[in-house]
Image (spheres, rainbow, N blue to C red):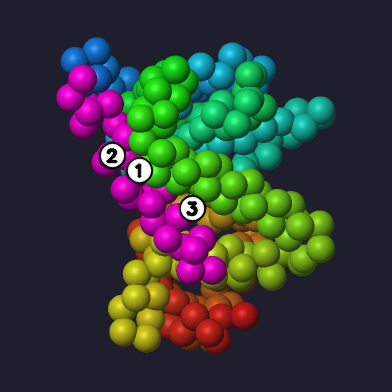
């Protein structure tokens, strides 16, 4: 778990700082931030995969559609995170869609060619990018396994535990998860319903295992949250 945690920290915080073209002198002048309105698509399934995207501000939802048109949410990403990186693993056309979730979502875009050139010049960075891709694939595989074999309550609790492992901040014996996810967002990410998420979170709160508001979830003792 510690290796995954380090990769997640790298993914969530450091990558934007070292990769954004605005922070690379010879790329800075020819790059602009692009702004998207709430619920505006950044790309669609089957669209040519030409760019890697970094979130400067706001949130982005990554998902796909079933044959009958049902939306499946794979991840919700925030400031500092990247997406579209599967183009580096040979994805020629997008298998997912990317949608801006907030007003004035700001993205920094780097072309696939520029990214490959940057990686060729920095072998250590290149290795981390491919580890990042591997981490996301493992997370998706784990999510699929959870949807198939585990009940709704277990999926929600494991989602909270995973969020704590990846993004939580220790505060004494407690763990703080800063999040803007709504109960509906958590339901979409765990394949449950908003009502079920609300019921489970309230049950955990009544047992004094967690506390939560619109901006954060506080886990009293991570070991007791099973």
Q: Position of residue 140 (x, y in %)?
A: 65, 49
- Taking the image as drawn, is residue 59 in sight? no
Label placed on residue 181: none
Name the quadrant of the C terminus.
bottom right
Mark 2 and mark 3: Cα distance apart in space: 30 Å
Ranked by sequence position, the earlier of labels 2 and 3 is 2
Say whether marks 2 and 3 touch (CB < 8 Å).
no
Binning the other alpha carbons within 10 Å of mark 1 as few (below 14), some (14 to 19) or many (20 upward) gives some
Task: Left or right? Give the position of 9 relative to 22.
Answer: right
Mark 1 and mark 3: Cα distance apart in space: 26 Å
Give whichever of 150, 185 is nearer the camera.
150
Q: Is residue 41 above or below residue 145?
A: above
Label placed on residue 18: 2
Say what secondary structure mark 1 lies in.
Answer: helix
Label placed on residue 15: 1
Q: Which residue appears at 74% of the width and 34% of the height? A: 70
Q: Is residue 8 above or below residue 78?
A: below
Say what secondary structure mark 3 lies in.
Answer: loop
Q: Position of residue 47 (x, y in %)?
A: 61, 15
The region drawn magenta spans: 1-26
């Amino acid at each position: 778990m510690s290796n995954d945690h380090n990769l997640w920290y790298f993914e969530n915080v450091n990558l934007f700082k070292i990769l954004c073209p605005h922070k690379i002198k010879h790329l800075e002048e020819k790059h602009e931030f692009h702004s998207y309105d709430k619920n505006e698509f950044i790309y669609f399934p089957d669209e040519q995969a030409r760019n890697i995207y970094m979130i400067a501000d706001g949130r982005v939802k990554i998902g796909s559609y079933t044959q009958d048109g049902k939306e499946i949410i794979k991840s919700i990403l925030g400031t500092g995170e990247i997406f579209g990186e599967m183009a580096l693993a040979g994805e020629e056309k997008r298998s997912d869609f990317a949608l801006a979730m907030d007003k004035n979502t700001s993205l920094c875009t780097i072309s696939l060619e520029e990214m490959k050139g940057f990686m060729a010049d920095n072998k250590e960075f290149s290795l981390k990018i491919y580890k990042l891709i591997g981490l996301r694939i493992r997370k998706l595989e784990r999510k699929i396994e959870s949807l198939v074999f585990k009940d709704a309550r277990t999926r929600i609790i494991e989602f909270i535990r995973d969020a704590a492992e990846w993004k939580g901040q220790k505060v004494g014996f407690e763990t703080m998860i800063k999040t803007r996810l709504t109960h509906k967002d958590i339901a979409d990410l765990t394949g449950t319903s908003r009502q079920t998420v609300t019921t489970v979170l309230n049950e955990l709160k009544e047992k004094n295992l967690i506390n939560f508001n619109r901006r954060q979830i506080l886990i009293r003792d991570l070991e007791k949250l099973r």
